[in-house]
Amino acid sequence: MTERLNSNLTVRTLARDLGLAAGPDPVSGIVKFCQARIRRILAEMDCTQDACGILSLTAARLDTEFVDVNSEQEASALQQQFVMTGETGLALMRKEFAAGVLGITVLRLNKKRFERRYVSVINCCGRNAERAYFTKWHELVHLLTLTDQSRLSFRRTHVAVDMKDPEESLVDVVAGHLAFHPPLLKPYARRPLSFELIEEIRAAVFPEASRTAAMLGITKAWPKPVVLVKAALASKRNTTAKQLRATGVSVNQAAADEGVSAIRNFRVPEGSIIQDVFADRATRAEGTEPMESWVSSDGSHWSGGEFVVRAIRLGDCIQAIFTRN
Ligand SMILES: [Zn+2]
């Protein structure tokens, strides 16, 4: 997905408007730009051990107020209140939330002296509550990447899995990097990263994050090499025969720095413990395997040497974490 975003005109224009050299990889340029801004904000206060503290301080510095909306009635009442006070940007909020919008950030048109400049209403109705932590970071990334052109008439809505809009996809990528702030993980990094440890960190540090977001976010931000692999039955292009393949692969920065490479869609090697878990020979398994055993039919292979692989079943697919210990 990042390759598609890197070549997208909207993304390249945004990088340029932020004063960054677009280059071949504007996405990581924008990620680094936002990370640097967060570091500057956090330097003001000692709250680097608390995910909620980091979120609130960042919101305060970016001058937005989060308003959690927990039910349709609340959405209705709030919408009425906003309209009465002149905030017409939120006049359709109830309908938009019902249609799947997760968050809306608007510039206040009728700001009182004591109010923040922006308001970010967050859809916490039903299952959406599980995504609220991530949605809040998504809204903050919009404000972090505001350019002069967009500052005056700002209004953004955030819909789940809106893959068509490149700016929304970009904002999700950046939010994934910011929500799981690396210094928060440091105290845990002496232990090997396992599914249990990810859940322990989520419960202790990011209780508002969903399990899926935590799995992806924590492995990405982990200070040591990690490759996260999701394996499922899938067919190769132009064929119908399904085989167990890596349908999702995420190589974190520490692994990329060591030259580890892993490509999507490779077939899971025959001897891998991932095959054992998939065939129900075990509900979970752990073993040491070389990256080089992942070979494609054209002879290319993954690289990075030996990794400890931990695999579990998640519904129809297998989730595996590759670490050095
Ligand atoms: Zn958005």
Image (tube, grey):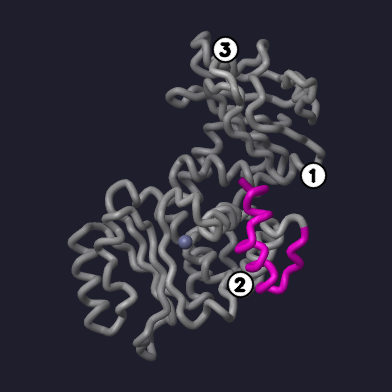
Residue range of the region highlighted in magenta in the rendering: 1-23
Q: Are marks 1 and 3 in contact (CB under 8 Å)?
A: no
Report the Cα–Cα distance between label 1 and label 3.
30 Å
Q: Can residue 179 be seen in the rendering of this structure?
A: no
Q: Are marks 2 and 3 in contact (CB under 8 Å)?
A: no
User: Which of pointers 2 and 3 lies earlier in the amino acid sequence?
Assistant: 2
Mark 3: give few (<14), some (14-19) or many (20+) Cα within 10 Å.
Answer: some
The amino acid marked with disc number 1 is: Asp
Which quadrant would the N terminus be assigned to in this image?
top right
- Disc number lying in front (2 or 1): 1
Mark 2: give few (<14), some (14-19) or many (20+) Cα within 10 Å.
Answer: some
Residue at the limit of the structure toward the front, as seen here: 238
Identify the mark at residue 276; answer none if there is no mark.
Answer: 3
Residue 293 in the magenta stretch? The answer is no
Residue that label 2 marks: 41
Residue that label 1 marks: 257
Mark 1: give few (<14), some (14-19) or many (20+) Cα within 10 Å.
Answer: few
Q: Nearer the viewer, residue 232 or 131?
A: 232
Instruction: Name the spot of residue 167 as percent of width and height, x first.
Output: 54, 60
- From this view, report whether residue 153 is shown above or below residue 216: below
